[in-house]
Amino acid sequence: MPKSKSKITINLDLLKPQSNPEKLLVKFFRWLLSSGRFIFILVEAVVLIAFFTRFKLDADLAARKETIEEQIPFIESLKPDETLIRQTQLKLSTIYAFSQNSPNYDTLLKKLTEHTPVAVKINSLSLEKTVNKITVQINAQTPDNIDLVTFMSRLKDDQYFTDVSLTSAGLEENILKFTIDASVNILSGKTL
């Protein structure tokens, strides 16, 4: 009898079936198990860092609030000093504004006395302040008309005085009585 050989054959198909693709859910789980776990760990780390940072920031906020509340009585005790300082600052600013807006009469009188000859006697001096200038009216007398001319020329030559004019002149008992008008410009609240 002849021997019958029986062969065992295994049919392996190593290629994936073309007709049956993987389902989306299977692909998602495969991705989740391979790469997604790192993303999940990273997100969890960020959440934990934010959680612990919140505790630290709350503790810092509470400490600063406590520090501020401790200083409130001290700050309230300084309120009278602050009121006094504000009043002093207001007074100083008022004085400064007044000094800036008022002309320098000292300089004006010094200039006037520098230019007045010895023989001229000033009877009256009128100073009137307007917006941008001071109007000066001088009533004086002198025994000699040369002193009047000298006085007028000195005032006209000085740049401090403008619009210098002789408004009246008269002779009484050998004494020359005259009136001179002049102006002084005011720049920024100060005379030149």
Image: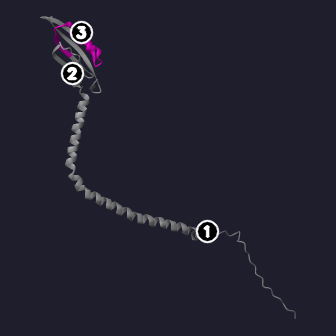
**C-alpha distance separating marks 1 and 3:** 117 Å
User: In this figure, which residue is indicated by the disc labeled 2?
Assistant: 109
| Front tag of 1 and 3 | 3
Labels 1 & 3 near each other (Cβ < 8 A): no
Tell me, yes or no, if residue 129 can be seen here.
no
**Start-end of magenta stretch:** 137-165
Quadrant for the N terminus in the image: bottom right
Tell me the residue that label 3 is attached to.
149
* Left or right: 29 as drawn, with respect to 182: right
Mark 1 or mark 2, which is nearer the start of the sequence? 1
Crowd class of label 2 (few under 14; some 14 to 19; many from 20; radius 10 Å)? few
Residue highlighted by disc 1: 27
Colouring convention used in this rendered image of the protein? one colour
Frontmost residue, 8 versus 109: 109
Q: Is residue 40 magenta?
A: no
SS class of the residue under badge 1?
helix
Q: Dot 3: what SS? A: helix
